[in-house]
């Protein structure tokens, strides 16, 4: 009952603050939209220069890159340095700009493909047919997902988890911190409110906004951006709310160790950035083992993996239950610590 | 209802400092107790320890014979903190209703009492305004109202009249005396000497100890000047120079 009173007050406070509500709803959509377009418009065509007089099959090359003919090597180098081309061909010399490994790889692929095509063209006609056959691509089946999955589809679940984790951490942390700083926490303690009831009240109050935020983010990703997903809307919601719960527990706990807003922000590099790096946005498979162990200390690692399992691999509640339970464990652990930390104010 | 506070040998260390060094205090219902002492002498600390919202290093506090902290007792205490301790993004009325509900009052009763208290502290016209937009004195008044909500038997006020104009202050004192007549126990800290004179009993704190305890007339009679101010200044000065109690 008392928890409901706390929750009601929080809801009144937050919903009266248009900017905070805006931040919770608009900010995630903005971030997701930007990332969506950034990822969709990565480099796909490369710019190649050919120095005039080089023995190159222009037509063949034009099918693979944006080609431009320059009069001499000096001009080619100048254009390369100015960032106008990604590489150039001068007789037998194949040059790549080389500072961006991703682009370099694309250029190298074009060179290799071009070399292969040229060799094929030089073969006698019968052999050419056989070689063409050998080069035919194998039919590959996607076990999960499909051929139309894009990079964004893969990153979407982790990103969703991360954004929810971050925003709820900041909002609940600041909110609880203010309660400490302004002295209202002490005043709450001069009533029959139990410490546990206070923490539960925070869960209920922020829970309402976490649901709202999660539903908006999910709906935006699934129905507006049309992220490829096995859209089990409620299971995704459940996972996201569990992520929000761990984040809320962590934010309110850490507020006990901050004297002001600024000190709370100092926890971001310690608890949010590692979660961002470990949550699957970057593949951890070949990182040193120590990072892989480290990643298991952070709740979002489990949450993001569960989201990927459900959204990309179509798994069900049974498959992600262990991850949910681990997060629940984190949550209860943080809550217990927080209720303990509140003993500073009243030891019953 | 009669309420008694009994504190025995209170010790509290904050940081490296022994803020309370063996405070004994008894207080009866129907009494207004003034806590005096130089800034930083431990008045706020003492009050928080009496309320059980700051844990003691040593000693015990009993309210109505029950050791605190005790959840049931808590609802019978009204506390006005030295900092305003209000929710700035709520309206004045919402603040009051919230604290009333927290003390277990029904929504309707909470609302009715909140409105009448708002009238008492002369905030009725501003009760729908958010507290961020209140002036310093308005916040103090609202803070006092939150201490009185729920009709508590023990009222603890940390510098209740700071930033309050003389007219309102007079009004508050009428209210304090009315509450006292109803058998409430009121503890307040103050730096204002003519206010201290209106208390039934005063304690003077210095270096974490009670160095004077008695009615205002009794204390005044102890000095040549015959004013509380003189006692206060003399003992505060001695404290600063590290001298022993007078
Ligand atoms: N959290 C804390 N950590 C360390 N020292 C503290 C803390 N809170 C208070 N103190 C110290 O305890 C002493 C007593 O503080 P307290 O607030 O009780 O004084 P006060 O008598 O209420 O003063 P004022 O009249 O200015 O309100 C001060 O010297 C202060 O420096
Ligand atoms: Mg004080």
Image (cartoon, grey):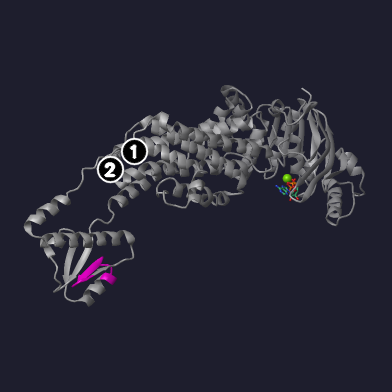
Q: Both on one chain, marks 1 and 2?
A: yes
Based on the picture, tell me whether residue A200 belongs to the magenta stretch.
no
Q: Position of residue B74 (x, y in %)?
A: 70, 29
Q: In the rendered view of the protein, which quadrant contains the N terminus of chain A? A: top right
**Relative vertical location of residue A69 with respect to residue A25 in this rendering, above or below:** below
The Cα–Cα distance between marks 1 and 2, rounded to whole angstroms, is 9 Å
In the rendered structure, find residue A149 and report the number of the disc placed on it: 2
Which residue is located at x 47 percent, y 33 percent?
A322
Q: Is residue A87 magenta?
A: yes
Residue A207 tag number: none
Chain letter for mark 1: A
A191 relative to A54 in the view: left or right: right
Q: Is residue A167 above or below residue A127?
A: above
| Nearer to us in this view, B64 or A157 | A157
Q: Quadrant of residue B120?
A: top right
> Which residue is found at the position 46% from the left and 35% from the top?
A323
Magenta stretch bounds: A80-93
Report the residue marked by disc 1.
A312
Mark 2 chain: A
Foreground residue, A309 or A288? Answer: A288
**How far across and how far down the image is residue B166, in percent?**
70, 42
Locate residue B125: give its quadrant. top right
Image quadrant assignment for residue B132: top right
């Amino acid at each position: 009952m008392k928890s409901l009173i706390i929750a009601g007050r929080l809801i009144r406070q937050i919903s009266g603050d248009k900017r905070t509500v805006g931040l919770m709803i608009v900010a995630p959509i903005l971030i997701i939209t930007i990332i969506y377009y950034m990822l969709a418009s990565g480099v796909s065509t490369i710019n190649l220069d050919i120095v005039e007089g080089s023995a190159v099959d222009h037509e063949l090359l034009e099918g693979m890159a944006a080609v431009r003919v320059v009069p001499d090597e000096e001009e080619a180098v100048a254009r390369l340095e100015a960032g106008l081309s990604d590489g150039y061909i001068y007789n037998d010399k194949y040059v790549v700009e080389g500072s961006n490994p991703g682009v370099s790889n694309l250029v190298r692929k074009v060179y290799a493909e071009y070399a292969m095509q040229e060799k094929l063209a030089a073969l006698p006609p019968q052999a050419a047919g056989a070689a063409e056959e050998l080069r035919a691509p194998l039919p590959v089946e996607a076990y999960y997902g499909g051929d139309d999955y894009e990079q964004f589809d893969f990153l979407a679940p982790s990103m969703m988890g991360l954004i929810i984790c971050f925003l709820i951490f900041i909002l609940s942390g600041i909110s609880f911190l203010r309660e400490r700083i302004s002295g209202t926490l002490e005043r709450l303690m001069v009533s029959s409110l139990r410490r546990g009831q206070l923490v539960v009240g925070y869960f209920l109050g922020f829970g309402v906004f976490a649901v709202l935020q999660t539903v908006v983010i999910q709906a935006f990703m699934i129905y507006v951006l049309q992220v490829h997903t096995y859209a089990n809307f409620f299971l995704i919601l459940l996972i996201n709310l569990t992520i929000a719960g761990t984040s809320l527990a962590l934010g309110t706990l850490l507020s006990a160790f901050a004297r002001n807003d600024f000190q709370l922000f100092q926890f971001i590099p310690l608890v949010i950035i590692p979660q961002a790096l470990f949550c699957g946005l970057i593949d951890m498979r070949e990182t040193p083992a120590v990072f892989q162990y480290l990643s298991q200390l952070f709740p979002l690692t489990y949450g993001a993996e569960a989201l990927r399992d459900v959204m990309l691999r179509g798994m069900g509640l049974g498959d992600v239950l262990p991850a949910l339970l681990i997060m629940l464990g984190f949550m209860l652990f943080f809550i217990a610590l927080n209720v303990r930390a509140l003993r500073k104010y009243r030891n019953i | 209802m009669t309420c008694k506070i009994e504190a025995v040998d209170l010790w509290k260390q904050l940081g490296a400092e022994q803020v309370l060094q063996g405070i004994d205090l008894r207080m009866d219902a129907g009494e207004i107790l003034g806590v005096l002492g130089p800034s930083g002498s431990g008045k706020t600390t003492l009050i928080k320890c009496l309320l059980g919202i700051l844990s003691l290093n040593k000693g015990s506090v009993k309210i109505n014979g029950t050791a605190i902290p005790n959840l049931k007792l808590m609802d019978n205490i009204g506390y006005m903190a030295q900092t305003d301790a209000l929710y700035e993004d709520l309206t004045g009325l919402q603040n009051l209703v919230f604290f009333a509900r927290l003390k277990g009052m029904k929504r309707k009763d909470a609302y009715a009492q909140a409105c009448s208290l708002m009238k008492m502290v002369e905030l009725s016209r501003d009760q729908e305004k958010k507290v961020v937009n209140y002036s310093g004195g308005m916040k103090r008044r609202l803070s006092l109202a939150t201490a009185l909500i729920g009709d508590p038997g023990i009222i603890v006020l940390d510098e209740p009249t700071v930033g309050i104009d003389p007219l309102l202050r007079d009004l508050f004192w009428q209210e304090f005396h009315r509450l006292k007549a109803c058998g409430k126990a009121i503890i307040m800290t103050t730096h204002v000497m003519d206010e201290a004179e209106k208390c039934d009993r005063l304690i003077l704190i210095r270096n974490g100890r009670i160095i004077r305890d008695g009615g205002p007339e009794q204390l005044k009679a102890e000095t040549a000047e015959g004013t509380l101010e003189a006692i206060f200044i003399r003992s505060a000065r001695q404290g600063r120079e590290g001298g022993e109690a007078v």
